[in-house]
Amino acid sequence: MKGMTVIVKTVTRWVKVFIFLFGIYIIITGHLAPGGGFAGGVIIACSYILLTLAYGKEFALRRLGSRAAHHLDSSGALLFLVVALFGLGSGGLFFANFLQNRYPGADFSLLSSGIIPISNIAIGLKVAASLFLIFVILAVLRIVLTEDGSQKMIQEEEEE
């Protein structure tokens, strides 16, 4: 049996959705309240790390594979760069808030800050994917002793 006990798996099954949604909420409302892309990305990564700890590495990698996490990581960085370059193209300044100037929203509303929510989404994607990949790499990495007494790092999980 991979993973932890039935109790931990049952609680994880219920809690993972709320953790993921809370991370999305923190990312989307990061320009109105404390939080933002980095904090929301960490919370979303924690939901996938919780899946990995409760169900095992194979289950979590079926939900979000390392290739998909690499693509999300790259997409977040690319989206962040594109937003910055659009500011350069439309206002003459790198990261100019071109949406705020063109479509000013009502104060303290969800669409009141121009490019900041888009930047928060890009940062959230990047942070969530990067932290999950770091966790997976560290979970797979093993240090074993060789016959001569030295240590060797391997990245293959031993068969049980």
Image (cartoon, rainbow, N blue to C red):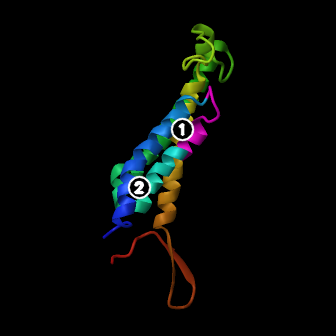
- Amino acid tagged 2: Leu
Q: Position of residue 101 (x, y in %)?
A: 63, 10
Which sits earlier in the primary sequence, circle 2 or circle 1? 2
Indicate whether 77 appears above or below 5.
above
**Element carrying mark 1:** helix
Magenta stretch encompasses residue 69: no
**Magenta segment, which residues?**
31-42
Indicate whether 125 appears above or below 106.
below
Q: Which residue appears farthest toward the bottom when viewing the image?
A: 148
Indicate whether 32 appears above or below 23.
above
Q: Position of residue 82 (x, y in %)?
A: 55, 27
Residue found at x 35% / y 61% = 58
Tag on residue 51?
Answer: 2
Q: CA distance from mark 2 to mark 1?
A: 19 Å
Badge 2: few (under 14), some or many (20 or more) residues near its Cα, within 10 Å?
A: many
Quadrant of residue 95 in the image? top right
Residue found at x 53% / y 78% = 152
Residue found at x 58% / y 36% = 37
Residue marked by disc 1: 124
Q: Is 19 placed left or right of 2 in the picture?
A: right
Residue found at x 56% / y 28% = 29
Q: Position of residue 137 (x, y in %)?
A: 49, 61
Q: Is residue 39 visible?
A: yes
Q: Nearer the viewer, mark 2 or mark 1?
A: 2
Q: How many marks?
A: 2
